[in-house]
Amino acid sequence: MKILITGGAGFIGSHLADKLLAEGNEVTVIDDLSTGRYANVAHLEDKPGFRLLIDTVLNSRLMEDLIRETDRVYHMASAVGVRLIMERPVKTIETIFRGTDVVLGFCSRYRKRVLVPSTSEVYGKGVSVPFREEDDLLTGATDKHRWAYACAKTLDEFLALAHWKETQLPVVVVRLFNTVGPRQTGQYGMVVPRFVQAALKNEPIPVYGDGEQSRCFGHVADVVEGLTKLLDNPQCFGEVINIGNNEEISINGLAKRAIELTASTSEIKYMTYDEVYGAGFEDMARRVPSLEKAERMIGYKPTRTLDDIINDVAAEFRSERPDSLQNAQA
C-alpha cells in the first residue's frame, strides 16, 4: 500500500513510518520540521519506498496531490507539548484545526482511509476515572490558554465524525494518552525525557505543583502497533478510541522511578505552575484511560511497562544522543 504520514518526522510519526515500511508499504512523510526532527527519519532516507517532503499540510495543492495518490493517511501533524501551547496559543489552534480541515477535505474527496489522532487532553477536568470514550468532556474557561489544545482537538474530532456522518468517510479518531519512548525530547514540556535527562546528569528533577497529579504512560511501540490496526478494521470507522497504557503513577512516583532506574543522585525540586507557565495555568489531577473499547475492537493490550519506557529512554540518551545530556534543561 501507499501510505501518507503527515508530521511523520515527529516522535510518534517516525516510529509509525518505521513499522509501516517494515511491513512492505510505500511511505511518504510530509513534515515542516517545526516540532519534528530530521534526525528521526534520517535512517529511512535510503530505504526503498520511503519519501520525505519538507513542507506543510497547509499547502493545499501539494496535499491534494499526495492524498490522491495514496491509499491511507495517518494525520499525525499537530502542535505538541504543554509549553508550546502556553507560549504560542494562536499557532496551536491554527496548526491543529486548519491542517485537519485540509486533510479531511481531500480524504473525503478521494475516499481515503484516514486516522486522526486526538488527545487525552479533551477529557479536561473530568473526574470519572478511567476515562471512557463516551464520557462528557469538561474543559476550563477560554481565558486559560492551557485548554486551547484540548478544544482544538475536540473540534478536530467533531469535524472527523461529521465527515463520517455525512459521507461515510472511513475515518478513525484515536485519543492518545501520554505516549513516550525513544526520540521524544523534553523541549516542549514532555515529562519523561525531562526527568530522565536530569537524572542521568544527577541534576535536580523539576516537579510542578505538589507532584501528586497522576498520569499513565504508554510505550510508543505499543501505541504504533495499535494505530496500524485501527485502519485495518472497518468497524473502527466513525469511532473514537482510546490508545495508551492504564498503569497509573503520580509525578512524584515517576521522578523517583527515574532516579532509581538510572542510579542517579538527583533530588526532586518542586516548582509552582506559575513559575513555569505564568499565572492562570490549570492541571488535571488524574488521567487514566479505559482501554476496553480498543481491546474489544482491535485486541489492543499494552505489553511494555513504565520501567521499560524509562530504561529505553535512558539507553537512547546514553548511547545514541549523548549531546542531549549536555542540554538536559534546554
Image (cartoon, rainbow, N blue to C red):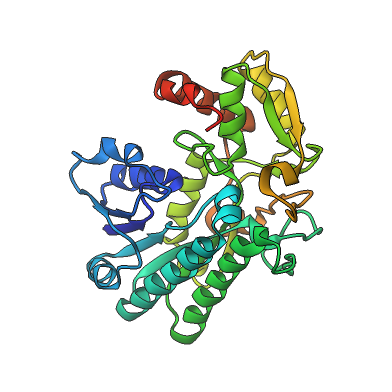
Which residue is found at the position 26% from the left and 47% from the top?
24
- Percent of width and height locating residue 36: 40, 46
Q: Between residue 310 and residue 227, name the one nearer to us.
A: 310
Q: In the visual, does 178 lie left or right of 116?
A: right
- The vertical placement of 233 against 8, above or below, is below
- The vertical placement of 270 against 20, above or below, is above
Q: In the visual, does 148 lie left or right of 185?
A: right
Q: In the visual, does 24 lie left or right of 128?
A: left
Q: Quadrant of the N terminus?
A: bottom left
Q: Between residue 298 and residue 127, name the one nearer to us.
A: 127
- Percent of width and height locating residue 146: 66, 58
- Percent of width and height locating residue 181: 51, 35
Which residue is found at the position 63% from the left and 59% from the top?
293
Q: In the visual, does 275 lie left or right of 314?
A: right
Number of marks in the image? 0
Q: Where on the picture, by quarter, is residue 249?
A: top right
Which residue is found at the position 52% from the left and 73% from the top?
238
Which residue is found at the position 78% from the left and 61% from the top?
126
Q: Between residue 149 and residue 250, name the one nearer to us.
A: 149
Q: Between residue 105 and residue 305, name the one nearer to us.
A: 105
- Percent of width and height locating residue 184: 48, 38
